[in-house]
Image (cartoon, grey):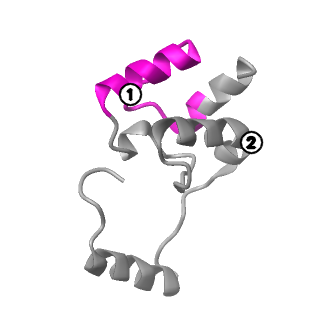
Amino acid sequence: MKGKPVDEVTAARIRKAAREGRLEIAPQDKIGGHRQQVDRILRDIGFPEALVTDESSFSDFRLKDTDYGRLSRQYGFDVGRHDRIAAVAERLAGLRC
């Protein structure tokens, strides 16, 4: 999540919305198809237990420019803050990483 951590009031509102069925998780089809690569990415960015969807991008996480440089070197292609995690996972799968 970008910015400040979620406070207790916001967390309570999110839980209430989920109980009432007003909260919908975006699709996870692409993420699910490359689970091994997604797990690797989440470990590499320091959020191994994060919930990600097909719409999740690196900008959803508090990363520094040095993190993007490290990921780009590790993966062998440019990784930027606006890249979707599913797209990077798919590319890693194509490289058999």
For marks 2 and 1, give the one nearer the viewer: 1
- Residue under the point 62% across and 32% down: 89
Q: Is residue 36 left or right of residue 15?
A: right
Q: Is residue 12 above or below residue 78?
A: below
State the mark number for residue 81.
Answer: none
Indicate the quadrant containing the C terminus: top left, top right, bottom left or bottom right: top right
Q: Where are the magenta residues, as a range?
A: 64-88
Q: Kindly report the distance in space between the C-alpha atoms of the residues bearing marks 2 and 1.
A: 25 Å
**Amino acid at the residue labelled 1:** Asp
Characterize the local packing of mark 1: few (<14), some (14-19) or many (20 or more) Cα atoms within 10 angstroms.
some
Residue 8 found in image quarter: bottom left
- Dot 2 falls on a residue whose secondary structure is helix
Q: Which residue is mark 2?
A: 33
Q: Is residue 65 magenta?
A: yes
Q: Could you tell me residue 82's position as x and y percent?
A: 39, 32
The residue sitting at the left extreme is: 4
Mark 2 is surrounded, within 10 Å at the Cα level, by few (under 14), some (14 to 19) or many (20 or more) other residues, namely: some
Q: Which mark is residue 67?
A: 1
Relative image position of residue 35 (x, y in whole percent): 71, 43
Among the two numbered marks 2 and 1 on one chain, the one whose residue lies closer to the N terminus: 2
Q: Residue at x 24, y 57 (%)?
A: 4
21 relative position to 7: left or right: right
Q: Closest to the observer: 77 or 55?
A: 77
Q: Residue at the location (57% across, 36% down)? A: 41
Give 57 or 50, whichever is nearer the viewer. Answer: 50
**Residue found at x 47% / y 73%:** 23
Q: Amino acid at mark 2?
A: Gly
